[in-house]
Amino acid sequence: MGIPLKQIGKLLDRKPPDVLSVLFAKRKGLKAETARARPCDRREARAKVEERKALWSPELQARVSQPWEELTREIQSATAAGETPGRRSVN
């Protein structure tokens, strides 16, 4: 571990930290980090959404939705036939 035996002894002799104090300190640190990150993330996210709006069209939506709709129908059909992943019909 790289810790001298004298230091290990001192560590073992110490009173363990109060769990609640440690958790509250961690919570406080996480809240501070979240508060710092959140405003920047929201602005960036809004900017990305605005940029992508120009790329969207009803035709694009139809084109990307079609494969998902087909997959959904295939899954529903397989489920109705009693198929499960890795196993064919159970009937």
Image (cartoon, grey):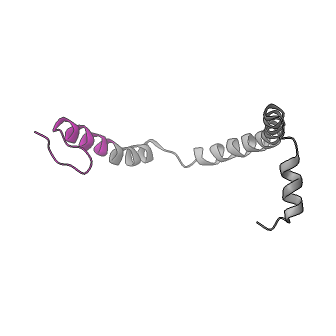
**Front residue of this view, candidates 7 and 89:** 7
Q: Quadrant of the C terminus?
A: top left
Left or right of 16? Residue 54 is left
Residue 36 place in picture, x, y as percent:
83, 42
**Front residue of this view, candidates 33 and 56:** 33
Q: Quadrant of the N terminus?
A: bottom right
Q: List the single residue furthest toward the left.
A: 91
Q: Is residue 52 above or below residue 35?
A: below
Left or right of 60? Residue 21 is right
Left or right of 83? Residue 52 is right
Residue at 89% from the left image edge and 61% from the top image edge: 6
Residue at 25% from the left image edge and 37% from the top image edge: 76
In the image, residue 3 lies in the stretch drawn in magenta? no
Q: In this view, does 5 lie above or below 61?
A: below
**Front residue of this view, candidates 29 and 35:** 29
**Front residue of this view, candidates 30 and 61:** 30
Residue 71 place in picture, x, y as percent:
30, 45
In the image, residue 87 lies in the stretch drawn in magenta? yes
Residue 85 place in picture, x, y as percent:
27, 48
Q: List the single residue furthest toward the bottom.
A: 2
What count of labels does the image hold? Answer: 0
Q: Quadrant of residue 50?
A: top right
Residue 59 place in picture, x, y as percent:
41, 45
Left or right of 3? Residue 43 is left
Residue at 17% from the left image edge and 48% from the top image edge: 88
Q: What stretch is highlighted in magenta?
A: 69-91
